[in-house]
């Protein structure tokens, strides 16, 4: 594990990419994927699995051609929980304030990091598609948010099932390659990796 001085120097040079897992949103007060699965109506769930995961529910809905109904319901649950929060979490605000960080990769659909940027008046730019990647701003102060699993207000962008991952690779090849390059050249550490590619 790198020491704090090394991490601080890498941050200053803009070499670190922050990868946010589900725990960031869970700690802020949003439901986990397991909780979302429990909250979904029974008619979305595979009848042969007692407690299906969100992935299993999405796979079932893919097979039943019901994803167009599932994704908006997931959005409703997340948005209701997010709207109930009084303010962005301290962790999201702290990350938004790191001016030398210009790329964050969340695995979550929520917009808590975007809300934190708004709260401190920092420019941000979410990337969900190849078009977003190509049009991203070059200003050093902008926080680029690469939403690899989609974003809240675009339910069609949600990446959950096996079919979703295949579709993402097929329909957003440049974004997929960008992520692939970051992960190939990242160090495996408890923090997020240092990437050799520029943002």
Image (cartoon, helix red, strand yellow):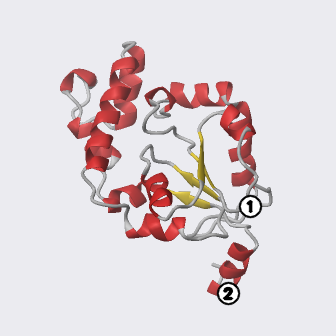
Other residues around mark 1 within 10 Å, as few (<14) / some (14–19) / many (≥20): some
Q: Which mark is residue 5?
A: 2
Question: Is residue 31 among the parts visible in the rendering?
Answer: no
Determine whether the residue tagged by mark 2 lies in a helix, strand or loop. helix
Residue 127 in percent (x, y) is at: 61, 42
Q: Earlier in the sequence, mark 1 or mark 2?
A: 2
Q: Is residue 65 above or below residue 24?
A: above
Q: Is residue 199 visible?
A: yes
Q: Can you give x and y, in whole percent of width and height, for residue 142 in the image?
A: 65, 57
Q: Quadrant of the N terminus?
A: bottom right
Left or right of residue 154: residue 103:
right
- Residue 25 lies, in percent from the top left, at 38, 56
- How busy is the neighbourhood of tag 2: few (under 14 within 10 Å), some, or many (20 plus)? few
For disc 1, the marked residue is 195
In percent of width and height, residue 138 lies at 76, 52
| SS at badge 1 | loop
Residue at the spot 45% in from the left edge and 64% down from the top edge: 92
Q: In the image shown, does 22 or 116 lie closer to the viewer?
A: 116
Locate residue 72: give its quadrant: top left
Q: How many marks?
A: 2
Real-space Cα distance between discs 1 and 2? 18 Å
- Say whether residue 168 is left or right of residue 60: right
Residue plotted at (34% across, 44% down): 33
Checking the image for residue 13, the label placed there is none
Image position of 7 with respect to 51: above or below: below
Q: Nearer the viewer, residue 127 or 158?
A: 127
């Amino acid at each position: 594990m790198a020491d704090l001085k090394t991490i601080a120097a890498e941050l200053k040079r803009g070499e670190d990419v922050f990868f946010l897992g589900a725990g960031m949103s869970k700690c802020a007060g949003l439901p986990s994927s397991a909780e979302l699965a429990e909250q979904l109506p029974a008619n979305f769930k595979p009848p042969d699995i007692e407690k299906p995961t969100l992935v299993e529910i999405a796979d079932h809905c893919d097979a039943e051609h019901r994803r167009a109904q599932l994704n908006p319901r997931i959005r409703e649950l997340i948005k209701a929980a997010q709207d109930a929060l009084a303010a962005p979490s301290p962790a999201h605000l702290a990350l938004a304030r790191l001016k030398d960080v210009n790329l964050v990769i969340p695995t979550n659909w929520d917009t808590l990091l975007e809300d934190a940027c708004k709260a401190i008046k920092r420019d941000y730019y979410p990337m969900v598609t190849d078009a977003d990647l190509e049009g991203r701003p070059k200003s050093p102060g902008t926080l680029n948010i690469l939403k690899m699993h989609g974003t809240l207000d675009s339910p069609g962008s949600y990446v959950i099932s096996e079919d979703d991952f295949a579709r993402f690779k097929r329909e957003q090849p440049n974004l997929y390659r960008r992520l692939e390059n970051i992960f190939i050249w990242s160090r495996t550490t408890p923090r997020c990796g240092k990437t050799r590619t520029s943002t």
